[in-house]
Image (spheres, helix red, strand yellow):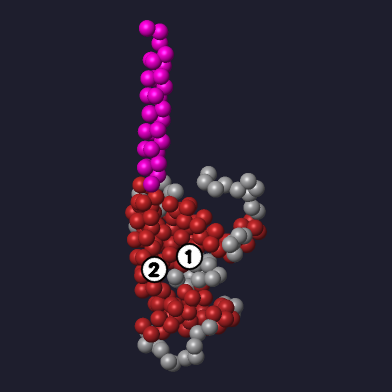
């Protein structure tokens, strides 16, 4: 398996790494990119799966992103592994930006702008702790509405970028393999010629 750890993590370590990477965010980002680029599927399937994962990450259904990304990607015949990896788009750094953006846009789309105090991420956590749909619905509703255009936009950009990146990655891989085959063939030809030249006349 690609990038297998020497010492597998237990469930507590996996949970911690899922919430916050063990190393830098930059290194984790490149790790995810490499995993997506090395997937065995068509560029379109990988791109649509990645786009689906990013789209779902823009929704407020925290805790269900992987499940929703898997289901949606299966319906559109995308790569499910790419979708699951791409849900990493929603992380502790991007969630405050995503939630605030979807909330504000959703309120604007629902015609609720200026009718309530500004949104803060702490408001969402405080109301979620009450486990009351009536309490959290005024926040969740605009976030759901606002997540659709934002998710579509992010997903579209992700699809285009991923499809181009996968195609270029495979083109470079094919070029390297072709160069290795040509070098191996040239070496064999040189050895054959050298062997012929050493034969007694």
Would residue 88 be counted in the magenta stretch?
Answer: no
Overall secondary structure of the magenta section: helix
Residues at circles 2 and 1 in contact by the CB criterion of under 8 Å:
yes
Q: In this view, does 95 lie to the left or right of 13?
A: left
Would residue 198 be counted in the magenta stretch?
Answer: yes
Residue 184 in view (yes/no) = yes
Whole-percent x and y of residue 131?
Answer: 57, 77
Q: Distance between the residues labelled 2 and 1?
A: 10 Å
Whole-percent x and y of residue 196?
Answer: 38, 15
Outermost residue, bottom direction? 115
Q: What range is drawn magenta here?
A: 172-201
Residues packed near mark 1 inside 10 Å, few (<14), some (14 to 19) or many (20 plus): some
Q: Nearer the viewer, residue 59 or 175?
A: 175
Q: Is residue 153 above or below residue 72?
A: below
Image quarter of residue 179: top left
Q: Mark 1 points at which residue?
A: 89
Q: Mark 2 points at which residue?
A: 154
Q: Which residue is drawn at 44% across and 58% down?
A: 83
């Amino acid at each position: 398996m690609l990038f297998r750890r020497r010492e597998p993590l237990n469930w507590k370590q996996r949970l911690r790494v899922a919430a916050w990477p063990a190393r830098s965010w930059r290194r984790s980002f490149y790790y995810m990119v490499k995993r997506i680029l090395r997937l065995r599927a068509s560029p379109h399937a990988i791109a649509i799966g990645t786009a689906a994962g990013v789209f779902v990450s823009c929704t407020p259904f925290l805790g269900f992103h992987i499940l929703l990304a898997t289901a949606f990607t299966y319906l559109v015949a995308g790569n499910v592994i790419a979708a699951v990896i791409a849900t990493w788009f929603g992380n502790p750094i991007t969630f405050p930006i995503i939630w605030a953006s979807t909330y504000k846009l959703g309120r604007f789309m629902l015609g609720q702008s200026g009718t309530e105090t500004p949104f803060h991420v702490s408001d969402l956590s405080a109301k979620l702790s009450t486990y009351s749909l009536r309490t959290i619905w005024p926040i969740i509703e605009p976030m759901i509405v606002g997540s659709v255009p934002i998710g579509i936009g992010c997903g579209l950009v992700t699809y285009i970028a991923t499809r181009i990146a996968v195609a270029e990655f495979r083109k470079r891989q094919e070029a390297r393999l072709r160069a290795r085959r040509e070098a191996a063939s040239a070496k064999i030809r040189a050895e054959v010629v050298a062997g012929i030249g050493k034969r007694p006349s």
